[in-house]
Image (cartoon, helix red, strand yellow):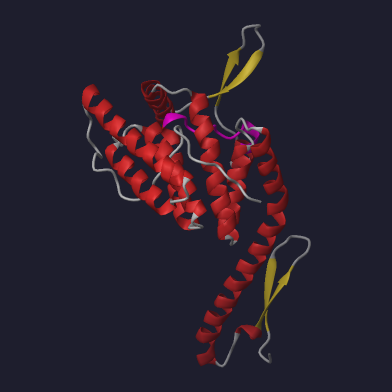
């Protein structure tokens, strides 16, 4: 299941060194000059990517990142997204995941991810529910609105200001988010292992909440169809490996007493799902 998303003038990335411009705020003129330099380097990197020079493209994207003020979250997110695309081409899955994750962090500051639905939140909270406000729609019908705590309200307000300052729309942010999530999901799937595949599954499920084109929708649907059996196999393998290590540790601790883990049997109660332990000295 190949995913090919090529960098464009609106889509770039890099993960490595922190920008030399961290924690600085510039005058509008200085900011414009730095951003222009960053965009020129970005365009050069895009050309290198198109030629298949992925290593050189990474280095050039990194230079673009170093020139870009770090508080320009949209521009930084685009750069980090494109560097993730380079790492995918080089099959450096770990670096691709790191780059994509850094890009998503920037996007989250511009457009915080949608909170879980009330049903999901209620389930996750053990049925305790969340505090609600009763509102009214324009036609007078009752509606339930989730009450925001001060911290969340401040975060959303800050994101709104940052998005307005970037000159980009929420649709622009979502467009980049789709590309980044597809790239990270691809890298996580290729990495394999229970944790990575579980992360890929979460990324693909997040993608179902975003506006997707037909090809991306097909990619997501296929992934969500094919991942569950791989996830279960990886889970069983990881659990078996973990139990093997625990068994080895247990045997090393019990050996001085003339015992081993074979002396202990765990029996599952099918009614309750719990386990009881029996000791068999003769094992």
Does the rendering let one see residue 1? Answer: yes
Residue 124 falls inside the magenta stretch = no
What main secondary structure does the magenta stretch of the protein show? loop
| Above or below for 271 versus 181 | below
Does the rendering let one see residue 101? Answer: no
- Residue 255 falls left or right of residue 61: right
- Residue 114 falls left or right of residue 103: right
What stretch of residues is rendered in magenta?
Answer: 110-120
Please count the marks in the image. 0
Q: Residue 132 location in percent, x, y?
A: 56, 25
- Residue 234 falls left or right of residue 114: right
Residue extending farthest to the right is: 271
| Above or below for 136 versus 56 | above
| Above or below for 228 versus 264 | above
Residue 111 falls inside the magenta stretch = yes
Q: Nearer the viewer, residue 126 or 231?
A: 231
Q: Nearer the viewer, residue 51 or 91?
A: 51
The residue lying at 34 percent from left, 45 percent from top is 60
Dividing the picture into quadrants, the one containing residue 138 is: top right
Q: Residue 141 location in percent, x, y?
A: 67, 11
Residue extending farthest to the front is: 51
The residue lying at 41 percent from left, 24 percent from top is 163
Q: Residue 214 location in percent, x, y?
A: 68, 34
Q: Nearer the viewer, residue 109 or 39?
A: 39
Q: Residue 279 location in percent, x, y?
A: 66, 82
Which image quarter holds the C terminus?
Answer: bottom right
Q: Nearer the viewer, residue 211 or 91?
A: 91
């Amino acid at each position: 299941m190949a995913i090919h998303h090529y960098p464009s003038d609106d889509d770039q990335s890099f993960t490595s060194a922190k920008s030399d411009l961290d924690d600085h705020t510039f005058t509008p003129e200085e900011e414009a000059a730095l951003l222009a330099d960053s965009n020129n380097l970005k365009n050069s990197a895009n050309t290198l990517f198109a030629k298949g020079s992925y290593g050189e493209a990474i280095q050039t994207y990194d230079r673009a990142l170093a020139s870009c003020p770090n508080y320009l979250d949209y521009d930084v997110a685009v750069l980090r997204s494109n560097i993730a695309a380079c790492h995918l081409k080089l099959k450096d899955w770990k670096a691709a995941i790191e780059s994509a994750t850094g890009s998503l962090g920037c996007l989250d500051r511009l457009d915080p991810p949608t909170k879980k639905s009330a049903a999901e939140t209620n389930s996750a909270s053990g049925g305790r529910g969340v505090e609600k406000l009763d509102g009214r729609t324009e036609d007078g019908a009752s509606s339930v609105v989730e009450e925001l705590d001060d911290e969340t309200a401040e975060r959303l307000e800050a994101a709104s200001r940052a998005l307005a300052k970037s000159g980009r729309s929420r649709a622009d942010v979502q467009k980049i988010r789709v590309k980044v999530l597809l790239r990270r999901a691809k890298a996580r799937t290729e990495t394999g292992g229970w944790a990575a595949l579980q992360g890929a599954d979460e990324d693909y499920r997040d993608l179902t909440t975003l506006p997707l084109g037909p090809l991306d929708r097909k990619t997501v649907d296929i992934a969500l169809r094919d991942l569950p059996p791989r996830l279960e196999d990886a889970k069983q393998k990881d659990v078996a490996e973990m139990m093997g290590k625990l068994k080895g540790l247990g045997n090393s601790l019990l050996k001085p007493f003339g015992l081993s883990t074979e002396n202990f049997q765990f029996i599952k109660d099918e009614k309750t799902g719990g386990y009881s332990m029996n000791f068999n000295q003769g094992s």
